[in-house]
């Protein structure tokens, strides 16, 4: 089953309208939204590559911190069974806010 989703491209100040087709939970196609009042269905080459950017294996998907020169996933010491739980963006933002107050 596929369904179109309509968003604004975040890559530049032109804010082109996007029609994103999602099939079985994955992005199947990205094209210009023909009904967008500004871009009228046109998008630039950057916007047309959003699918590849979204699927890039090197894309940051979880919060990371640098420890001993290496980026690692953040854990806050909570655990389920014997597994540590990775920090969420919200919990990491709170942690950074606390550290900034110290400065």
Image (spheres, helix red, strand yellow):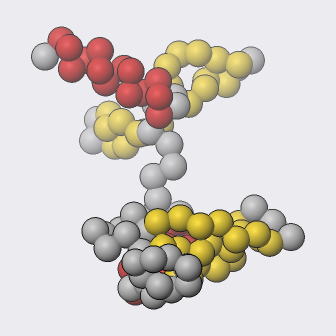
Residue positioned 40% across, 86% down in the render: 45
Q: Is 7 situated left or right of 26 in this image?
A: left
Q: Is 35 situated left or right of 44 in this image?
A: right
Residue 67 is situated, as x and y percent measured from the top left of the image, at 32, 34
Regarding residue 91, the answer to whether it shows in the image is yes
Query: Foreground: 3 or 79?
Result: 3
Query: Foreground: 76 or 68?
Result: 76
Residue positioned 50% across, 43% down in the render: 62
Residue positioned 28% across, 68% down in the render: 13
| Quadrant position of the N terminus in the picture | bottom right
- 94 up-or-down from 35: above or below: above
Residue 64 is situated, as x and y percent measured from the top left of the image, at 41, 39
Residue 23 is situated, as x and y percent measured from the top left of the image, at 77, 70
Regarding residue 52, the answer to whether it shows in the image is no
- 81 up-or-down from 89: above or below: above
Q: Is 19 situated left or right of 24 in this image?
A: left
């Amino acid at each position: 089953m596929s369904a179109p989703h309509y968003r604004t491209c975040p890559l530049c100040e032109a804010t082109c309208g996007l029609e994103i087709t999602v099939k079985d939970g994955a992005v199947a196609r990205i094209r210009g939204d023909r009904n967008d009042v500004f871009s009228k269905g046109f998008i630039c080459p950057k916007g047309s590559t959003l699918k590849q950017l979204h699927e890039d294996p090197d894309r940051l998907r979880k919060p990371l911190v640098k420890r001993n020169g290496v980026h690692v996933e953040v854990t806050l010491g909570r655990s389920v069974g014997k597994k540590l739980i990775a920090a969420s963006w919200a919990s990491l933002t709170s942690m950074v806010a606390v550290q900034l107050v110290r400065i």
